Amino acid sequence: MAKRAWVMVPGPIEFEVEVLQALGAPTASHVDPDFVDVFGEALALMRTVWRAPEGQPFVLAGSGTLAMEAVGANLIEPGDGVLVLSTGVFGDRFEDLFSRYGARVTVVRSEIGYGVDWEKVEQELSTGDYRLVTATHVDTSTAVRVDPRRLGDVARRHDVLAVLDGVCSVAGERIDQDEWGLDAVFTASQKAIGVPPGLALFVVSPRALNRFLSRRTKVPNYYCDWAQWLPIMQAYQQGKAAYFATPAVNHIKALRIALRRIQDEGLDARFERHRRLGEACRSALTALGLAIVPENEGEAANTLSAAWYPHGADAGTFLAAVREAGVVLAGGLHPKIAPKYFRVGHMGATGPGELLATIGAIERGLCACGVGFEPGVGLRAAQRVYWS
Ligand code: PMP
């Protein structure tokens, strides 16, 4: 049997067999009545998973960055003020993206490992002229988690749109889009949703759609324009086919299956499983003597963990030894600290079995780097916490 390693990076993740089978099934026409049902159900399930009964879901062929692009293209007009709360690489990405649509962008940038300074945000929104504020729920480059409730709250009080990058959080960390007043929440299929890379997914509030509908200028992006996609999504929701650009038929079939699995597990149970996985992973890493990149436990993500290498450990040697032990981990992503830390994804269908295999492989990697620790100490910590 070919040697296969578990992909425990923070996206793409390991996918369930039924989801993969849908990708490999014969491709239906996008106007086939069966596919119309599939697409309609997937859109309805997105509202459930985002907890946005009032929201408008969109499914576009592309990655998470396309979802960012769609938000920028449709909600921004030249001269609009945008406040970006950046806790890592993906917040920083929004600065460049929004500027290309003519926004005046201000960034409240956190130090690496820290969450948002809400006092600064409050001050900025009170004094500046803003149309939109955005935060990254979980920045995959730092594993720092931001509280989306505060984002929604501050945005409501200052009458600006709240946009949440949920690429590394939707279906893994708790989100109540409607209740928390979030105007756009987007993700990509390859993360906690559990479908191979290929779909940009987002749900937009009625308030954001109204702002979009009252634009003074044309959306300067042909493919992303919601005026093109809104009638398509509405048609499939009503059990009718419509065409603007060919939908990713097999990916949408796979999405329906993945969303059904999420619904069957139950959202609360799913968030709780992720919480336990996150806590167990961080406990194991700490027991092995590693420091966690997020400085405050309350701001550490549950969908991935990031840890600093111990003194003297070489990234290449560590990752190769972990791979040899059957697990693929991710190196550092934030350019300022990239060689100094690594990342472990534990989202989607991941359970305690995969986590324990991963901790075992990390122990092998540390041994290969000559780091001293009591063998099994990480595994014991993970088990204690997961099943406590
Ligand atoms: N935002 C976050 C938080 C991400 O983790 C990622 C991808 N790692 C993106 C945006 C961009 O998504 P994609 O790579 O699918 O374009």
Image (cartoon, grey):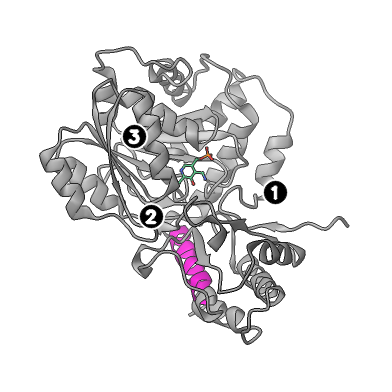
Q: Is residue 161 left or right of residue 296?
A: left
- Residue 174, disc: 2
Q: Is residue 19 left or right of residue 302?
A: right
Measure the alpha-carbon separation of dots 1 and 2: 25 Å
Residue at image mark 3:
55
Q: What's the residue at 35%, 68% (across, down)? A: 296
Q: Position of residue 115 (x, y in %)?
A: 32, 57
Q: Residue furthest right?
A: 1
Q: Residues within 10 Å of mark 2 (few under 14, many from 20)?
A: many
In the image, 116 versus 12, the foreground residue is 116
Q: Position of residue 252 (x, y in %)?
A: 58, 32
Query: Hey, what amino acid is under mark 3?
Result: Gly
Measure the alpha-carbon separation of dots 3 and 1: 30 Å
Is tag 2's residue or tag 3's residue first in the polypeptide sequence?
3
Q: What's the residue at 86%, 55% (across, down)? A: 2
Query: Hey, what amino acid is under mark 2?
Result: Arg
Q: Residues within 10 Å of mark 1 (few under 14, many from 20)?
A: few
Label 2's element?
Answer: loop
Is residue 345 at least partly visible in the picture?
no
